[in-house]
Image (cartoon, grey):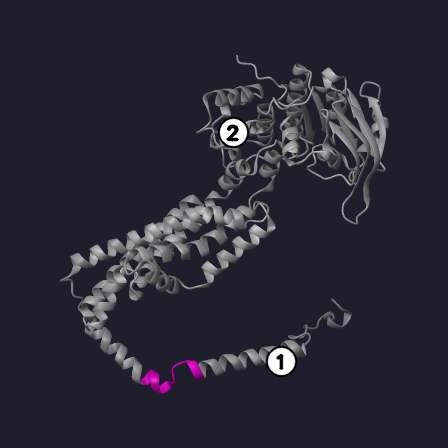
Amino acid sequence: MNVVAFQQTAPEAAVSPARSGLPAASVRGLSKQFGTGPVIMSGLDLDIHHGSRVAIIGANGTGKSTLIRMLVRLVEPSGGDIRLLGEDVRKLDAPGLKRLRSRVGFVFQRHNLVTRLSALTNVVHGVQSRMSGPRTWTQLLAPREVRAEAMNCLERVGLADKAMARIDTLSGGQSQRVAVARMLMQRPELVIADEPDASLDPKSGEEVMATLAALANEQDATLIFVSHRMEHAIRFSERIVGLGGGRVALDQPSDTVSEAELTRFFHHD
Amino acid sequence: MTEALTPKAGQLPPRIQRVNPVAFSLSVAVAAFVIWSMTTAGPSPDQLARGLPNIGNILSRMFPPDFERIDRILWSLFQTFQMAIAGCAIGLVLSVPLGILAAEGLSPHPAIRTAARSLIAVFRTVPDLVWALIFVIAVGLGSPAGVLAIAIDVMGFAARFFAEAMEETDKGPREALSALGANRLGMIMSAVLPAAAPSMIATSLYCLEKATRASVVLGLVGAGGIGVELKVAFDLFAYQTAATIILVILILVIAVEQTGGWLRRKII
């Protein structure tokens, strides 16, 4: 079987953080305020080392999703510094940001797939991180090697038999796994997942998290995920970062933290 | 709701809760304008009394329809339909990029979006017959003028609906492709157009129906098609031939509308 590299440095990528000894993600004095609304985050500092698996937890409104979206500037920070994969994120121009994003796999709360298209075409879209043009728009036009790699990604999430099925015929859990396959197609160096288990039933959510964690383990890739399920945060990470009051309120290895300590971070209004 | 307007138990609420003097005055002014327009621009009872028998007279002279020139009429009808197809195809193809430029979140710059929206508004506001007159002067009499007029008219309609269909698509897939570093064109072609496709196809079918209806009248101003035949038949008082032309136009328009409706139901 053709093994797809989960973590493969893009040609334009800077020196790998692992090789340089730099953290995969480093945040200093990060702040965020939406318009004139309340301050979501203020002076947040955080380092995430290469190859680690980190769960970000926190009650509603503590800025978990905002934090991970700011890492790739899907949300613009109000202040502070972000270094990701050796790049000064806030200083990147549009082409630089595009290059950085191509190295980061992002899995969203919803699958964010094109529901009228097949699973295979949606996975082929992932190649747009390093290729462009009509041959990346649909599996029908995709080069043979791209189709083969996309099939391989689907195989790795256990959905090769659903390659030609339209997304709107798949279950929520299957769709989220197709989204993971699309992320694999990117060959990311870092994976960020924003509550990938949130919109799924407990069993499907567990499957998706297990798939993500297994893939990260397999390739020793960095995984940062937000989860609103305590058991997932403990089981699938090696470090838990809890947000509260706009800052890091807890930062401990997953195997040393008690459920009692975590409870306050899972209080939802 | 204030306490004064809240009906007490066992009581019916008042039919009109509050009369706004400004709204009331405006309503009276609008009603007065409508009555004034009807009396000045509409037909007088006297004109109606004289006109209705004339309509009856023309209709009676149309029957039975004269099928002697049916070959020529059908060929002309076929050319008219070709004109509608060609104009519609050109208009729809050009409506896709114009719609993208006019769509919020897809247009590369707000100024470009405003310019595209303004162009679409101009295309839509000027009637197709006026476009036909302009193109008859520009490219001469005949079907090319009609094709161009239909194309512009289709763009005024389709580009607007294409833009709206694209704006209404789920933002999630766009965000996902943007997050993986896809370029704008890749995002539009991979995520936006496939999602907007059913709505765009339905709009396109409606445009074909509209173009078919338009193509039969464009001939009246010299822009080709069966409209020329119809005008000549009326000018020569050949009402029976005119009846045949109207009949075949009716069959074509109904056939296109029915087929379009059936396809729309199948697609949506």
Task: Determine the chain carrying the residue at label 1.
Answer: B
Task: Please tell me which residue lies in front, A259 or A40.
Answer: A40
Q: Which amino acid, by three-letter code, is at mark 1?
A: Ser
| Same-subunit check for callouts 2 and 1 | no
The image position of residue A22, as x and y in percent, is 77, 20
Could you classify mark 2 by the number of other residues whose Cα lies within 10 Å: few (under 14), some (14-19), or many (20 or more)?
many
The residue segment tinted magenta is B40-49
Vertical placement of residue B141 versus A71, above or below: below
The image position of residue B66, as x and y in percent, is 16, 65
The image position of residue A5, as x and y in percent, is 60, 17
Instruction: State yes or no: residue B42 in magenta.
Output: yes
**Is residue A168 rendered to the left or right of residue A44?**
left
* Residue at the disc numbered 1: B25
Extreme residue toward the front, this view: B138
Q: Give yes or no for contact between labels 2 and 1 (Cβ–Cβ under 8 Å).
A: no
- The secondary structure type at the circle numbered 2 is helix
Instruction: State yes or no: residue A192 in magenta.
Output: no
Residue at 80% in and 25% down:
A47
Q: For residue B16, what is the image quadrant?
A: bottom right
Q: Which mark is residue A117?
A: none
